[in-house]
Amino acid sequence: MKKSMTTDNHPETLLSYVGNVSSTSIDYLLELAEDKLNQQITTKTTKKKVFRILVETMQNAQHHLYRPNSAKDDMSVNFQLVRDNLAYTVIAGNPVRNSKIEELKSVIDKLNSMSVGQLRDYYRSRLGQGYTSTVGGAGLGFADIIRKSGKKISYSFKPVNKDYSYFSLQVRVSE
Amino acid sequence: MDDFFLEATAKTPRLYFSKETGEFEISGRSIPENSIEFYKPVINWLDSYITEPNKHTLLVIKLEYFNTSSSKCLVEILRRLESLRNQSIVKVKWCYEEEDEDMQESGEDFKEIIKVPIEMVLVREN
């Protein structure tokens, strides 16, 4: 059954997950997210955008996840898909090594500050290098997320201990 | 050499690469976690094909979704077709659906990067 669009601006959580990340859990979450999106009254363009951004954020979190040595440390990831009457919000969080924070900040800040044309040129230049380039794997993913959403990525780092912090990113996709 | 064929899955595209006809197709979804591993066999197949290509080579790309790691592999595939330009007449068709501006934009990205003609094909839904 199709869900009607909310008339107020109360957000509705379409997907919320906290737990371990694996290929199986990501497959399941993407399947669930796609079902939820198909139940929404929204354009096909927007559904596809949101789904692509979910794929990219979830796989980014999986690839760049810091896996602490100690079993005491929490290595859970967090994914959410929330809808209000203005936009969809994709939220993804994962632990990252503290030594990676400056690099991540610098990449996202640089991409966030780019104009549409600069971002397109950056993306094309990085893409043209093919997979032989091993430098900064996340750069292309973040650039793709910003291009598709047309919005900046909001992010935060919450310190956990001397080794790692919890990285969260949020991106909105307007209708 | 044999043709290369792989059925589509929920996360990986159908790959159909025929030495007999010189017609290749990548269609469906391409969102594997490890794209390099997925595309390696077909890239190896292409490395053999380019040593003795057909007179005409056509690649049809008709993807619904692909992740950024797959896009790097597509570049690798297209680069191999680029290297054929003096030995085979190479054409690439990039198919996108009417309401899919992202897929259209992606096609434009590849057109800019790759030096073989990429024809943008608008697919209208029935």
Image (cartoon, coloured by chain):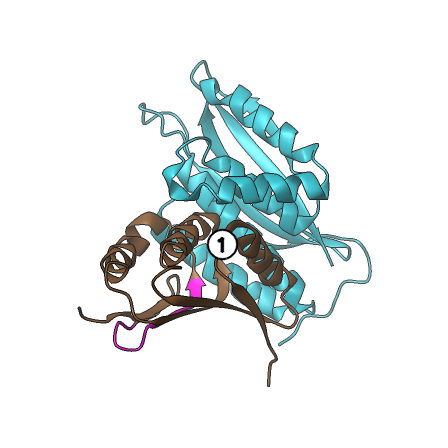
Classed neighbour count for the residue bearing mark 1: other residues with Cα under 10 Å, few (<14), some (14–19), many (≥20):
some
* Residue A171 left/right relative to B48: right
Q: How many marks?
A: 1
Query: Magenta residues?
Result: B18-29
Residue B48: in magenta span: no
- What colour denotes chain B? brown
Residue A171 coordinates in the image, percent (x, y): 65, 44
Q: Residue at x 66, y 61 (%)?
A: A46
Q: Residue furthest right?
A: A8
For residue B83, above or below residue B100? above
Q: Residue furthest bottom?
A: B126
Instruction: Judge by depth and name the residue closer to the eye, B113 or A92.
Output: B113
- What colour denotes chain A? cyan
Identify residue for label 1. Answer: B115
Residue A4 coordinates in the image, percent (x, y): 73, 70
For residue A16, above or below residue A113? below
Residue B19: in magenta span: yes
Q: Is residue A167 visible?
A: yes
Instruction: Judge by depth and name the residue closer to the eye, A16 or A143.
Output: A143
Q: Residue at x 22, y 58 (%)?
A: B48
Chain letter of the residue beneath label 1 in the structure image: B
Q: Residue at x 41, y 30 (%)?
A: A74
Q: Residue furthest front?
A: B86
For residue A3, above or below residue A114? below
Query: What amino acid is labelled 1 in the image?
Result: Lys
Quarter of the image with the N terminus of chain B is bottom left
Q: Residue at x 62, y 41 (%)?
A: A121
Instruction: Judge by depth and name the residue closer to the eye, B121 or A65.
Output: B121
Disc 1, SS: loop
Instruction: Judge by depth and name the residue closer to the eye, A97 or A69.
Output: A97
Residue A102 coordinates in the image, percent (x, y): 54, 20
Residue B108 coordinates in the image, percent (x, y): 60, 57
